[in-house]
Image (cartoon, coloured by chain):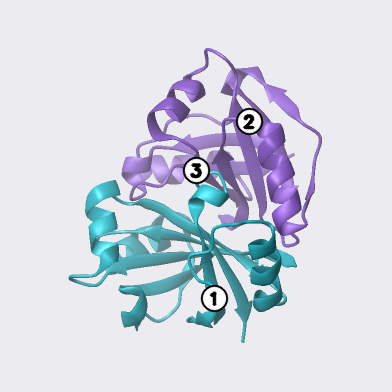
Chain colours: A cyan, B purple
Amino acid sequence: MVIGIGHVAILAGNLDETVKLYRKLFGVTSSEVEVIPEQGVKTAMLDMGGDAKLEILEPLPGSNMEKILEKRGEGIHHICLEVDNVEETLDFLAGEGVNLIDQKARRGLEGMVAFIHPKSTRGVLVELCQKY
Amino acid sequence: MVIGIGHVAILAGNLDETVKLYRKLFGVTSSEVEVIPEQGVKTAMLDMGGDAKLEILEPLPGSNMEKILEKRGEGIHHICLEVDNVEETLDFLAGEGVNLIDQKARRGLEGMVAFIHPKSTRGVLVELCQKY
């Protein structure tokens, strides 16, 4: 069951500059930078005041995310829906014929995560996250 | 001052089908459909459980939004940041050299709204909204 939008992720060429820009324009605060090699990014979270955050992603050199950035440019990359039970949600979605990028949840920064293919959700890349 | 993410908007070819799909897959509830001729869309809001919602947008025939859908396909269109004072925010952003699509706020569905050009925000189309 979905319990809210956890974050909206933005793919950018330079994490530090983007975090600085968003901090300056919108007066928000940011988390420490973290490197996630298995997702090919370094990332920071911006606290926007409500319960949904903005995640800034910068591709690591040579990663698949770098190719996505080159192809599509900067912009919104995915939305993360927080769920109470990610394995149950994946089972339900598989039963509905949804195309899952991750058949099983894997360890993410904030919880167990899995991605749904955008062709099953009207062009929207959706991450599911069950927080630790 | 930004007080949270109000919604994330998804541009889709068919509003009713998209709302039905998201309701089925994610167990969320939806608002009544509203037509906003001045924005060239019909729209419904999905309550995702938290304070940020999903807005589904279907272009009206002959609208500029129809051309955007034809060009880019379905997917995430913009994020809406809720602010406590939209005119003050616009003045501040103009002073920072930000490219504003709307120089002044105009009446939207849920409040006074104004859009910022994505070239000032790393490819992200940002709507500001001060709720009524």
Q: Name the residue under label 1.
A: A113
Observer-nearest of B107 and A79: A79
Q: What residue type is labelled 1?
A: Val
Q: What residue type is labelled 2?
A: Asn
The reply to whether the C-beta atoms of the residues labelled 2 and 1 are less than 8 Å apart is no
Observer-nearest of B110 and A10: A10
Mark sitting on residue B75: 3
In the picture, which quadrant includes the N terminus of chain B? bottom right
The local crowd at label 2, few if under 14, some if 14 to 19, many if 20 or more residues have their Cα within 10 Å, is some
Give coordinates of residue A25: x percent, y percent: 41, 54
Residue at far top of view: B62
The answer to whether residue A14 is seen in the rendering is no
Residue at image point 72% right, 65% down: A2
Observer-nearest of B65 and A123: A123
Q: Mark 2 points at which residue?
A: B14
Q: Give how far apart the Cα atoms at labels 2 and 3 are.
A: 12 Å
Q: Give how far apart the Cα atoms at labels 3 and 1 are.
A: 21 Å
The reply to whether the C-beta atoms of the residues labelled 2 and 3 are less than 8 Å apart is no
* Badge nearest the viewer, 2 or 3: 2
Give coordinates of residue B132: x percent, y percent: 75, 39
Residue at far left of view: A62
Q: What element carries label 3?
A: strand
The answer to whether residue A30 is seen in the rendering is yes
